[in-house]
Image: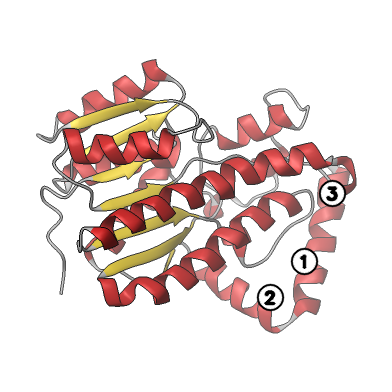
Amino acid sequence: MSRDLHGKSIIVTGASSGIGAATAIACAKAGMPVVLNARREEKLRKVADQVERHGVKAALVVGDVTDEGISERLLNAAEDELGGLYAVFSNAGYGSELPVLKTDLDQVRAMFEVNFFASFELVHLAARRLVEDSKPGHLLMCSSCLAKFTMPWHGVYSATKAAQNHLCLSMRAELAADGIEVSSVHPVTTATEFFEQSARRSGKGNDSDVLDHVPKWLIQKPEHVAAAVVKCLRRPKPEVWTSMLTRTFAAMATFSPRLLDMVMRRQLRRMKTG
């Protein structure tokens, strides 16, 4: 049975652009008040304006997801400004396009801090509050299709997303008796500024090789992912996939590592020849 989302608040991190902004607006259209989080206040306020055009309230918490105490601030904003906590969409994260051998340990730790540990802290604290208050809820992490397989130059990013996926699967089983749903979201390549930022972090200016090497029919708009998230909020499920073809490939790659190895070597050749 479909769940009525009207009046149920959601926290969205990384909400100033891309998947986060699109999801915040889609949730507002479904009647959900939204706590918006990102580092860029000006862009965040523009998203808040779009959210409130749909007749729901937006609360802003500006800051980096790794800032001390920010998860508590997000949860308090949901309870104090929006009337209570129902859902979390932990979406903030970043990637890089570097071979593992050119990635130093500090870079690995920094990416895990944002993509995994900050995400873990938010859903962990949210789950505790929901359990203590005996309230149902829904916790979602924006993982990636690369949680199930990887590609050259994206090994560390894939590792952070795999960690998110496994955490969600475990928490889903552990919290089921408390009426709390947990889901991981697995987008494919999405047309956002994620790849521009990834290129800059990798020392490539604003040019990203990723979009050049992905077939156009495999590149999705953030609104497509946002619609899938809202659909999952209405009808919860363990994993949200926005491409059945990619989901099928992920299953095949798990079944046959040789297939994945062949695809990765071919992709690496394409990347090197540019």
**Foreground pick, 152 / 63:** 63
Nearer to us in this view, 201 or 213:
201
For residue 101, side relative to residue 81 (left or right): right
Q: Which residue is mark 2?
A: 253
Residue 207 lies, in percent from the top left, at 70, 28
> Residue flagged by tag 1: what amino acid is it?
Val
Foreground mark, 2 or 1? Answer: 2
The residue carrying pointer 3 sits among few (fewer than 14), some (14 to 19) or many (20 or more) residues within 10 Å by Cα, namely some
Alpha carbon distance from label 2 to label 1: 9 Å
Picture residue at 72% right of the left edge, 39% below the top: 209
Amino acid type, callout 3: Val
> Which labelled disc corresponds to residue 250?
none
- For residue 208, which quarter of the picture? top right
Q: Earlier in the sequence, mark 3 or mark 2?
A: 3
Residue 39 appearing in the image:
yes
Dot in front, 1 or 3: 3
Instruction: Give the Cα separation between the discs numbered 1 and 3.
Output: 18 Å
Q: On the picture, is 175 further left or further right than 132?
A: right
At x 40%, y 74%, the residue is: 174
Residue of label 3: 100
Displayed quadrant of residue 140: bottom left
